[in-house]
Amino acid sequence: MKARATCPLDCPDACSLLLTLEGGRLVRVEGDPRHPITQGFACGKTYRYPERVRERLLYPLRRVGRKGEGRFERVSWEEALEGIAARLQAILDRYGGEAVLPYHYAGTMGLVENQHPLAFFRAIGASELLETICASTGSAAWEMTYGPRMAPDPEEIPENARYLLLWGVNSLATHSHLTPFLKEAKRRGAKVVHIDPYANLTSRFAHEHLKLRPGTDAALAYALAHVLFREGLVDWAYLEEAATGVEAFQEAAEAWPPERAEALTGVPAPAIRRLARELGEARRVFLRVGYGMTRHPGGGNSLRAVLLLPALLGAWRYPGCGAMLSTSGAFPLNKRFLGGRHLLEGRHPHRGYFRPNPGVRAINMNQLGTALTGLNPPIRALFVFNTNPLVVAPNTGKVRAGLEREDLFTVVLEQVMTETARYADYLLPATLFYEHPDLYTSYGHYYLSWNEPLAEPQGEARPNTWVFRELAQRLGLEEPTLYWSAEEVARSLLDTDHPYLEGITLERLKAEGFLKLRLPKPFLPFARGPVRFSPPPQVLPTEPLPDYPLILLTPPAPRFLNSTYGDVAALAEAEGGEPLLLIHPQDAEARGVTDGGLVYLRSPWGQVVRRARVTEAPIPGTVVLEGIWWEKWAPDGKGINHLTSEGLTDLGGGSTFHATPVEVEPLRLA
């Protein structure tokens, strides 16, 4: 059997896939040639999806060993649900809802299975998780600058864009289905420039790669603006019509001549001048930015400074031109009831009494370790779904200490035996994306998609929403939205008269699989603004520490997607078989590090052992380790987030993964 489905993973492409199933098991994945963005090809990691789930979890399990040992016994669903409900009810009765924390993120991007389980936690007054680990800083910066997160239509790039500026993003690895549109624009004469602290796939695609020091993006943006203003390359007609606060921004840019920016960023002043002049002459510029530059203490300000460059050029006047961070703001779905959001609007019932939502405790997901080890009153019950926090959350040592607490009741909904799953008191088998219905948006294009179940769940796997409906029944919760089916959730989301969704119904999505939003043609989301230059972005560079003089970056690996594919041996082998530390020859020589040698990598928060690869890829002063590897592949069995801190960004409370000060020294065997 071959059928269509949308890839559920956290990627802007939201690919349409053709799945081959035999006896309900996935045996092959292909790209859907009918989809205008997917264009018949899938990424290298998605082709391996059948290998990812060969040893999936199939039955409910209850812990019998110590936490972290991974020793479980099989139980029935009735035993598991009754046991969880009884333990949870006791916690609610004694400590109240804030003693419960759901920890979740983007293991699936389907709106139903990703978000609707939160209705259960909002109905019991649980602590609210702030979903900040990835996009919150970028979202805050964009919305402060432009408003809704919209971007040029990728399909309009080739015909219109004359300059492609790829800044802080390895788009060939992390937005691979944008590549055909970039290639066509390049074939038609567009110049491609990549700005990033280290050379990667996208650098090799570009005509030119400019390396800058991590966390100095705002200074480089201001220097480019400095030249644009000084040399009369700014589109004043556009700015007068569409922008506010330009004068204050111009004054700030005056303080950043290229020579000053070179001293901070490492980008030569002549290259800054040349780039600014080329941008000013081209005007029809497409800027693709990534979330990487936001993973710094000053990341929000950095992104704002960069995002304003297309506005200075008036690029938003042209189809396929402007800036792209995300397209997610163009999906005007009615999310009032999704995940029980309406329960946050005021007061809501919980078994006969009312809890005021303004008093609900909010916990930043970047600070899970502190929440589990130092919060007062403490978290007593943790529900983990759609994520693997022991590998992906900052400060692994502190997270592990929290998960080891015998008085913490932990329930994990998962597809495979992750590191986090080994700490569960109850481990519940979750369905795969082709075993349950769901609705998908995208943050890299403008197609809305629907997945029909293509196979019965293998073993006794169940969707997240089914689990929380069953628990809600056992707790006697009466909130109607807790019991909605996936179709009811989808119909609620589509219940809007916004013109972008005109004519898009669930029936059409079921029949056709995907539909493009009814966008104006050409799509010019900010041709008339509003663009807010005020307050002028601050320059808040990332600084090393005296004992930790290098900055560690942990960008995505081309064949991984966060930790999702961490158990696939073929993909790990293709990435080098183990996590490799990229270090510049200057930094290696100064420390006696040799290519292929093992090194200690230390930060103020921990230490790991890695194998060094001496390469000119990173800018001196920066070391790079691509990918969130499962711990089993590391020489010392420790994930890279043993080194990262729970520090937050300037905007949106985001993570600072790319601002980790470290030192490297050879591991000398006795």
Image (cartoon, rainbow, N blue to C red):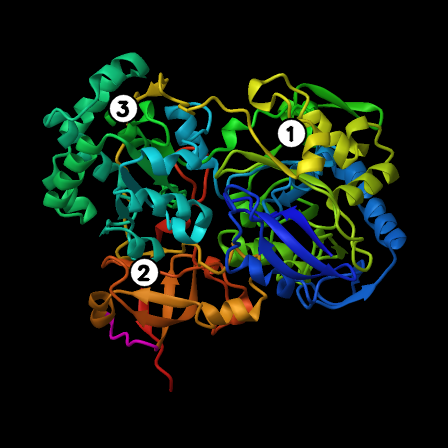
User: Is 593 covered by the magenta stretch?
Assistant: yes
Please provide the residue range marked out in magenta: 591-596
Q: Nearer the viewer, mark 1 or mark 2?
A: 2
Secondary-structure class at tag 2: strand
Image coordinates of residue 402 in percent, x first then y, are 61, 54
Image coordinates of residue 192 in percent, x first then y, are 27, 45
In depth, the one of 393 and 177 nearer the eye is 177
Q: In this view, does 619 lie above or below 246?
A: below
Q: Residue at x 20, y 66 (%)?
A: 586
Residue hosting label 1 = 360
What count of labels does the image hold?
Answer: 3
Residue hosting label 3 = 314
Image coordinates of residue 230 in percent, x first then y, are 10, 27
Residue hosting label 2 = 623
Labels 3 & 1 near each other (Cβ < 8 A): no
In depth, the one of 517 and 263 nearer the eye is 517
Image quadrant where one finds the N terminus: bottom right
Categorize mark 3 by other alpha carbons within 10 Å: few (<14), some (14-19), many (20+): many
Indicate the amino acid at tag 1.
Answer: Val
Image coordinates of residue 260 in percent, x first then y, are 12, 40
User: Is 496 covered by the magenta stretch?
Assistant: no
**Position of residue 108 in the picture relative to residue 468 (left or right):** left
**Position of residue 168 in the picture relative to residue 619 (left or right):** right
